[in-house]
Amino acid sequence: MRNWMSTLTLNQKLAAGGVLLGAVALFATPYPGSRVTLDAKELALAVGTESDHVEAPELAAWVIESRADYRLVDLRSEAEFAQYHIPGAVNVPMGNLTDAGLGRQEKLILYSDGGIHSAQAWMLLKAQGYKGVYMLKGGLEEWKDRVVFPVLADNPTLDQRSRDERLRSISMFFGGQPRSESAVAAGGAGGPGPAMPSGPATAKVAAPPSPAGGAKPGPVKKKEGC
Amino acid sequence: MAMMAPFFKYGMFGDETSLVVAFLIGIGFGFFLERAGFGSARKLVSQFYLNDLAVFKVMFTAIVTAMLGVTYLGWIGWLDLSLVYLVPTYLLPQVVGGLILGAGFVVGGYCPGTSVAATATGRVDGFLFVLGIFAGMFAFAEVYPLVKGFYLSGAGVAMTIPGAFGVPYGVVVFAVVLMAVGGFYGAGLLEKKFATGATE
């Protein structure tokens, strides 16, 4: 064996190595592809223990603290994103989900209008081996109801008063306004509800929402090509 | 945390750094072209006289090396191939473009990269070739409105051999390796047969 090897020139050895690597590559599947495999048990567990989502007030606290250890992903269309988005969010419309360059190791918080799109996206990303994917529970609807326009008690008890005070400041931070219990009851469920603020969030009391979108531009598309 | 490539797409460096990276890769490319003797038009055109097929061998070796590297990196999950940019395919325009480039190669003795390498080493013919490239680019830009229809004819999406023919990726890889090894063997035979020093 040794003798036979030593009769080969370097080029012949390299060629043999290349053929060997090529032969092994016959079985290679270098593209992850669009087929997915799911660990049903693991996913069911995550859903059952509710460890798959983040609640709106929790996310609000992260935004206020300017935490940077997560990436907030807005799954709605570009137009909707331009109109309003949670501060710090990046826009990844559903169709672009798998080629948006989201990191598999990043902590991703997904949100859409309700909960359906983010749940579907959560499933797809989980299936593709993304580790830290979470959903904003209830989506923008719940964000709106619990953070931007929280409902405060009409006749607060002592306990409720401090809670309401906190809700009010959080709401103001995101350019919203608390609603009173009675007003919500009078408005009924059918009403369109208050308009979302369009200006960027500031710690100051926000000015009344202006019609022009003050939203930050979406992620810059990187140049491609040779 | 596993290392993930392409680095640029994963945001490991930005636009500015990517220019520095491109510069370094370009310097390396030019260096190895020159070291392989490809800064000389004589060396380059001798492949057309079939007495020195170094260009074919070097380029095909580079292709096979890169292909195997990309395949294995993708396989073990270090490189996300779906994020690697593929040039859109315009089949007929690209065939015509290839023929024009090949004709220019035969006539001028350089291809675009090697002409720059030759210019860097002070070769006048390389420098004139580069001037010709810019003249051609200028002329093309001027007639672009007339040829735009043809230039953009075809699907315009990136076609791959595994995708177009439904062949498994690994089979294509293996076939290209065999093609290269067979080509090198054949090139050796041709070199022996035409070893007359015709261009010296």
Image: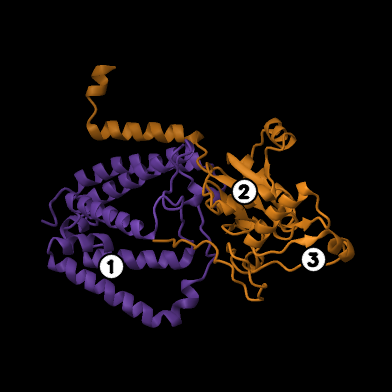
Chain colours: A orange, B purple
- Kindly identify which residue carries mark 3: A193
Closer to the eye: label 2 or 3: 3
Closer to the eye: label 1 or 3: 3
Residue drawn where x is 28% and y is 57% of the image: B23
Please state which of residues B39 and A167 is positioned toward the viewer in this rendering: A167
User: Label 2's element?
Assistant: strand
Rounded to the nearest whole Å, what is the CA distance between mark 2 and mark 1? 54 Å
Point out residue B146 in the picture as x, y percentages from the top left corner: 44, 82
Chain of residue at mark 3: A
Residues packed near mark 1 inside 10 Å, few (<14), some (14 to 19) or many (20 plus): some
At label 2, which amino acid type do we have? Answer: Ile
State whether residue A198 is above or below residue B179: below
Q: Does the image show residue B16?
A: yes
Point out residue A127 in the picture as x, y percentages from the top left corner: 63, 40
Residues packed near mark 2 inside 10 Å, few (<14), some (14 to 19) or many (20 plus): many
State whether residue A20 is above or below residue A225: above
Chain of residue at mark 2: A
Quadrant in which residue B136 is drawn:
bottom left
**Residue A109: mark in rendering:** 2
Quadrant in which residue B182 is drawn:
top left
Please state which of residues B187 and B109 is positioned toward the viewer in this rendering: B109
Residue at the farthest left position: B200
Chain of residue at mark 1: B
Q: Is residue B108 left or right of residue A144?
A: left
